[in-house]
Amino acid sequence: MGVPTTRHEGDDGVATASPLADNGASSRSRWARGRRSPRRPVIWVELGLIGVSYFVYSMIRNAVPEHETVAMKNAHWVWDLESGLGLAFEESWNHAINSVTWLIVSMNYYYATLHFVVTIGVLVWLYRFQPGRYAAARTALFATTGVALLGYYLYPLAPPRLMTGGDFIDTVIVHDTWGSMASGNMANVSNQYAAMPSMHIGWSAWCGVLIVLLARPLWVKALGVLYPVLTLVVIVATANHFWLDAVGGLLCLAFGFAVAWLWSGRLPHRLPAQAARRGRPDAGGVLPARGPEAGAPVPASAPAASEPAVPAGPDDRRQDVPPAAVPQAPVRAERSGGRPGPEEPAPAPVRPGPGGQAPARSSSS
């Protein structure tokens, strides 16, 4: 099946056919180009957005009904699954690390603080040094956290330290530290059965991926790899999560990056590091369009709309240029015998005098 065409006649009366423009493809192209022009984030908007989002997340997470019976049943199912796979190592890690007091206390504080400190630090780093990638990375983080709420509601899960019939140690209570929102005095204000998925892993992996892909020093990249791995050891050693909870956190992170890709057109590390300021062209020389054609970028080198168009004449010259000012080609004199002679300079252009009349040429003898 051929491409649809339209028939029209040119100035010479010859009919020609040209393909019809694909309006859908052009609009999709304009939309795709628009998605690839990130703008510099506004600090007060971002602070308010992060604050409100985390408040809403905490309220919804803690408002999810605590179905203790279902949560305990799910915890035993996960434990049995891990045992069947030969990977039920959480209890041995919990007891081994708990025997080293300074280490387990450090992990309790790690669990309580770095979950927030490192995530906020990476957001600040992106905002300050890579603003063009900030919005897409923040979108991935928000989508990761949002989809985790579905897991808390649809699959309530007791952490290992609360699972009945287990021999896990609640390290926060034993060592009198505040390493968990669901242990000690904080247990009354937090949902204790929101263990699947683990956002400690989701957020730490988000930080690690961006650090590895965007940081330049090799030692910083190494920290990006180490951070989520160490977080996995901490959540298992403190008996706050099964390792399968970490798998759930990684799945949520994959969903978050997919949302960021759909929203921005590319993954965060594929976007330009520097964002274009409002009203200025971006790295591709494209200005943001305004008005009804906001989806179509305007090249920065495009002529101004107020510049009058100059019609083309038969000889494709501007009509407002006097013929005398148009440079002329050199004239070749014909020698006898039909051979061209040397080039002679073109006569000087004749410019009109004050009265509008061309001055008379003096005849030479």
Image: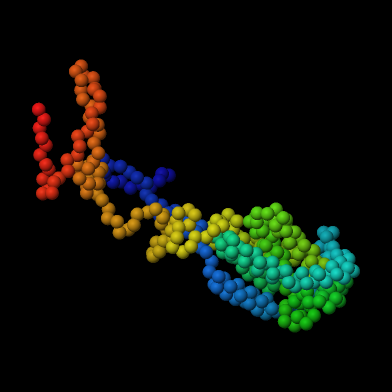
Q: Quadrant of the N terminus?
A: top left
Q: Left or right of 62: which side holds 32?
A: left
For residue 122, what is the image quadrant?
Answer: bottom right
142 w.r.t. 20: above or below: below
> How far from the left and from the top, in percent, is residue 7?
30, 46
Visible residue check, residue 300: yes
- Residue placed most toward the observer, 111 or 244: 111
> How far from the left and from the top, in percent, is residue 108?
80, 72
- Residue placed most toward the observer, 332 or 89: 332
Q: Left or right of 41: which side holds 228?
A: right
> How far from the left and from the top, in percent, is residue 299?
41, 54
The residue drawn where x is 21% and y is 25% is 333
- Residue placed most toward the observer, 153 or 171: 171
The residue drawn where x is 81% and y is 70% is 106
For residue 232, what is the image quadrant?
Answer: bottom right
The residue drawn where x is 32% and y is 58% is 305
For residue 109, what is the image quadrant?
Answer: bottom right
Visible residue check, residue 151: no
> How far from the left and from the top, in percent, is residue 302?
37, 54
337 w.r.t. 81: above or below: above
Q: State the count of labels.
A: 0
The residue drawn where x is 85% and y is 70% is 102
- Residue placed most toward the observer, 262 or 110: 110
> How is the rendered protein coloured?
rainbow
Q: Quadrant of the C terminus?
A: top left
